[in-house]
Amino acid sequence: MAIKYEKLVPRFLGYVKENTRSDENSNTIPSTERQTVFLNKLADELKEIGMSDVKINPVNSYLTAELPSNLDHDVPVLGLISHVDTADFNSENIKPKIVENYDGKSVIKLDDDGKYTLDPAVFSSLKNYAGQTLITTSGDTLLGSDDKSGVTEIITAMEYLINHPEVKYGKVKIGLGPDEEIGTGSLKFDVDDFGADFAYTVDGGPVGQLEYETFSAASLKVYITGKDVHPGSAKDIMINAVNIATEFQTALPDDEVPEKTDGRQGFFHLLELKGTVDNAYMDYIIRDFDRDGLEARKNKATEIAKALNDKYGEGTVRLDMHDEYYNMIDVIKDHMDVVKIAEEALKNLGITPDEEPVRGGTDGSTISFMGLPTPNLFAGGENMHGRYEYVAEESMEKAVDVILEIIKLNNDSKNN
Ligand SMILES: [Zn+2]
């Protein structure tokens, strides 16, 4: 097979070696200076390959650039978005390994000692990659395919079009942003400044994934104030905050937790519980696909708090609850043409679309609610966020193919 995108793999290997881990305890944008370093390098590269209007937004740190249209008529402007940060896992000194022509059944040793392995008996997805070239970690870091794959694929597609002026394309805007993994990067995304009519995040998993339904999400923090007195003379006086915390947790439905739900089921997830007799604190996330379902869960938490306050005294239990993001289908349902064009691109390339709802959120959830419909396309990676992460070269090539096919199909779209 002729190598169509010869810079794709070297580009990806260069990107993953850059440490761009984000930091949820930071208040700066980006959360880490190392992301700025990488974004500046990418800006230089985008200028070098011939992209126009390359700039880093001073407010949100998105690196944006434009590929001007070479059509003689207007079509909707396509946006392509990915993130440069990596998840909360060791990302120092990443040494990607290449496994050529994988047989789909062997155990792959990640580190030299074989302490960490990719075993098809554990990770059954490996069987899908017989005959392909895999890029893995060396066991002690993540790979950062999430989302350096997406970054690589978008830039490679742009480079292909610039080098093939005989191919016709409408205007494309690209946006490479920070801090997706800590949920803050897209909060200040500037839809007007970006200037696209429809967009995709290229941040999904294996080949075929096309995501336009996500969780609706809320955060819940519970603060409990107890009354600590000498246990010998505590009768009818002591209020034990830890016990009330347990009561709160027990009052929640015990089968609606992440470890007992899948598909379209929602949950309450207790992330942290700490306390003494004097005071206790619980940190939850609440998730549901249905907006009414999310509201019902929030009401449930409020009712439990009220019942406990009735029992132990007003102010014993205080809730701090706020919505984080909503199921993007609420927006996408009025823009299904954006899903249709991606489906058609996949089918034209012989790829079966995989449209399962995401049990999580994407930057596109936030951006869609800002007015730019933004489903999520696959970027190719498997086992994201840890040492078992890997991606096939062929998956990344297919992602570039899909981007180019969407651009081609868009040439016949009406601008409205
Ligand atoms: Zn990602």
Image (cartoon, grey):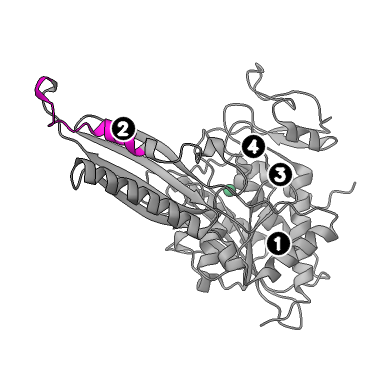
SS type, badge 3: helix
Mark positioned earlier in the residue sequence (3 or 1): 3
Q: Which residue is mark 3?
A: 10
At 68% from the left and 47% from the top, the residue drawn is: 11
Measured in 3D between alpha carbons, the distance from the residue under mark 3 to the one under mark 1, in whole angstroms, is 16 Å
Q: Name the kind of residue labelled 4 in the image.
A: Asn
Q: Which residue is mark 2?
A: 274
The residue range painted magenta reads 232-248
Q: Name the kind of residue labelled 3 in the image.
A: Pro
Q: Name the kind of residue labelled 1 in the image.
A: Met
Measured in 3D between alpha carbons, the distance from the residue under mark 2 to the one under mark 1, in whole angstroms, is 50 Å
Give the foreground label among 4 and 1.
4
Residue 190 spot, x, y in % from top left: 49, 68
Q: Which residue is mark 4?
A: 383
Residue 266 spot, x, y in % from top left: 53, 47
Mark positioned earlier in the residue sequence (3 or 2): 3
